[in-house]
Amino acid sequence: MKYLWTEDTGAGLHFWQLVNQLFFDNELVIESKESNQGILNALSDLEIKQSDKYYIAFDYVVDNQDIRNKYRLLRSLEKKSEGKVIILDIICFEHLILAFDKLVSWTGTRKADKIKIREDVLSAIENHRINLSKINSKKTLQYIAGFKRYSTERVMKSLAGELTENEKWSVRGSLMGECWYKDCCVSDHLYNLRCGKPEVEHGSEKMRMLIWSEEIQKIIKEVIV
């Protein structure tokens, strides 16, 4: 069997389930271990069969010391597995959403300040962190400085949440917002929630376009089914 383990729950787990369905023909067993520590615990107790392989979607940022420590343990477990455990090169689920080039046009978000911050942050990503020295905008630096416990992942989660505020596109719930994977794009003028204009209306096609985006392809090209 071939497994993909993620620490994500909710929308992040749902994303991997959709990737499995639409890109891998359900060849993978998708499991959430609910935290990076959960992944480490599961791997430590694992008895790997000869025919098994485990792909690990472990959120990794270098500006969080606890995550760096856990990642070192994960790498040691990977080395001991003799090729049966493969760590995917991922920052976090929210980074994949933020990096999608259709995000702003599809969601219809009008938060010009957050759109600019997103551009600044994405252009400053380097070695699994936001390189603040690459950011010239005072507003963007002030936004980042506003996090009491700063880390690249916290910034990504916050930005992704704000730019997908319309619940139909949300990535904060128990599932991804239904406009990502269903035939819909609903505007709710009563609550001032507007959708953008996806080029395709069919839900699976929208999701496939997301999956084929550059950052996601960098990750899943390592998965062999």
Image (cartoon, rainbow, N blue to C red):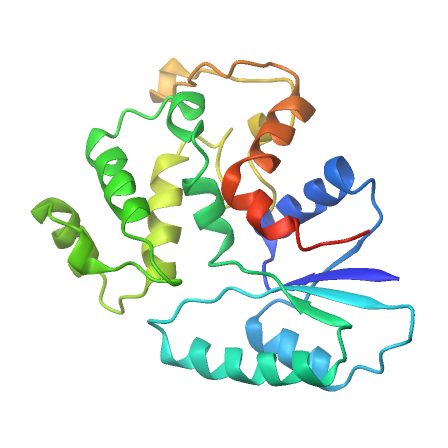
The answer to whether 32 appears left or right of 189 in the picture is right
Q: Is residue 56 visible?
A: yes
Q: Please identify the quadrant where the N terminus is shown.
A: bottom right
Q: Please, is residue 42 above or below residue 215 in the view?
A: below
The answer to whether 164 appears left or right of 215 in the picture is left
Residue 213 in the image: x percent, y percent? 54, 35
Identified at 57% across, 66% down, the residue is 58
Q: Is residue 146 visible?
A: no
Residue 45 in the image: x percent, y percent? 76, 86
Q: Please, is residue 3 above or below residue 221 in the view?
A: below
Q: Quadrant of residue 191?
A: top left
Residue 188 in the image: x percent, y percent? 43, 17
Q: What is the tally of numbered marks visible in this picture? A: 0
Identified at 17% across, 51% down, the residue is 135
Q: Please, is residue 148 above or below residue 192 in the view?
A: below
Q: Quadrant of residue 103?
A: top left
Q: Please, is residue 36 above or below residue 203 in the view?
A: below
Asked whether 108 or 222 is in front, the reply is 222
Residue 137 in the image: x percent, y percent? 11, 45
Identified at 25% across, 30% down, the residue is 111
The answer to whether 29 appears left or right of 168 in the picture is right
Asked whether 59 or 169 is in front, the reply is 59
Q: Quadrant of residue 147?
A: bottom left
